[in-house]
Image (tube, rainbow, N blue to C red):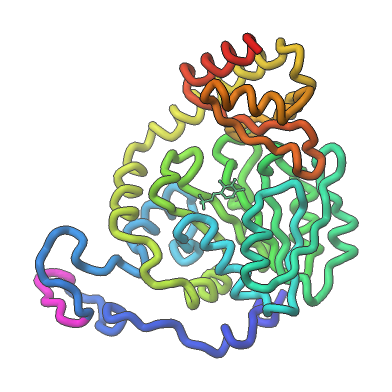
Amino acid sequence: MDIDKLVRDNIKKMSSYSSARDEYKNGVEENLIYLDANESPFDNGINRYPDNKHNDLKTVVSKIKNIDKDQIVFGNGTDEILDLIIRVFCNPNNDKIITLPPTYGMYDVIAKTNSVENIEIPLKNDFSIDKNEILRLNSINTKVLFLCSPNNPTGNSFDYNDLNDLIKGFDGIVVVDEAYIDFSSKPSLINIINEYDNLIITQTMSKAYGMAGIRLGMGFSNKEIINYINKIKPPYNINILTENKALNELSKADQLNINISLILNLKKVLISCLKKLHFVEKIYKSDANFLLVKVDDADLRYGQLLEKGIIVRNRSNQYLCENCLRITIGTQYENKILIKTLNEL
Ligand SMILES: *Cc1c(COP(=O)(O)O)cnc(C)c1O
């Protein structure tokens, strides 16, 4: 596939912002006197601009994810990367994206912000992908297809063969949003990233890694696509506090897996408790750190929980999610209070 043909002309033609630090050759790094960027010279740890190439962070993430450094892009949250992807490929008022509701709400918001139409192709009743319909609507203007797997808010992962068939059959870019992949027993598509020209995978530090507050999202693709995203990326989008905190947290190698298995165990316990409640009608199978739960009356149950100081997400107004609450797995204590409260309703 010729990726160049998918990229907007204005992006192809432009050159990216050249920051002060880009213009000297990186050689000896020590004892340099920096008088090039109009920063304050007084050292307080944050007086210098951050590294716009995020070199240290890329080194660490490249090892963790087993992918080349030039196949990684970082964003101020995944949301920034999703926005950059739309802006690289979609001409406003002309091109379109495809999303599969019920799904993550930001795809639609970002598309509309960029005057890009969002074609919605709903999931089937069992939350699987309507592959034929997607491939039927595939055109030169449908530039980006967003697949969220495991999907938010339904919690299921999409069938591996369906995902591969779509990446193969779709004529535009396919973004697979793997925000919840660390909780899933299914493999990440990052393992097959080099088999496709048109695949972008996004992951995040916000969920399993426990760093939603520092805003750090990751995009993985081939070098060519990453270069285009880098071309329009705000150079200093990852600040020094974020980079340092991430490096520090990522150095605690075992903690991630400990936390993930804790959450998965707590999820099992929560499922068995929820099953016993008379007003719970269905608990959907989840590969993520949340459960989609169908109750008798979502508005009522949501309100009752809120009154007791427990906030869940009411997804009742979403397609296929009538009377569904989305409940994040909390600590053992939080889950216990939740169950106690639900039992008393
Ligand atoms: C939480 C979430 C993200 C993460 O977004 P960040 O901007 O990285 O915090 C991305 N995609 C989905 C589907 C999510 O649920």
Tell me where residue 44 appears, x and y as whole percent.
Answer: 14, 59
> Residue at horizontal 73%, vertical 66%?
97
For the C terminus, which image quadrant? top right
Report the magenta residues as a range.
Answer: 29-36
Q: Is residue 126 above or below residue 83?
A: above
Q: Which quarter of the figure has residue 221? A: bottom right
Q: Give the tally of numbered discs.
A: 0
Relative to the observer, which residue lies in front, 319 or 86? 319
> Does 290 lie within the magenta span?
no
Q: In the image as oriented, which residue stretches furthest toward the bottom?
A: 13
| Left-right relation of 335 to 274 | left
> Residue at horizontal 80%, vertical 58%?
120
Tell me where residue 125 appears, x and y as whole percent.
Answer: 86, 39
Inspect this view and state whether residue 269 appears.
no
| Left-right relation of 72 to 246 | right
> Does 35 lie within the magenta span?
yes
> Residue at horizontal 74%, vertical 75%?
95
Q: Main secondary structure of the magenta part?
A: loop
Q: Is residue 118 above or below residue 216?
A: below
Inspect this view and state whether residue 293 appears.
yes
Tell me where residue 242 appears, x and y as whole percent.
Answer: 34, 53
Tell me where residue 149 appears, x and y as whole percent.
Answer: 67, 46
> Residue at horizontal 56%, vertical 90%?
13
For the N terminus, which image quadrant? bottom right
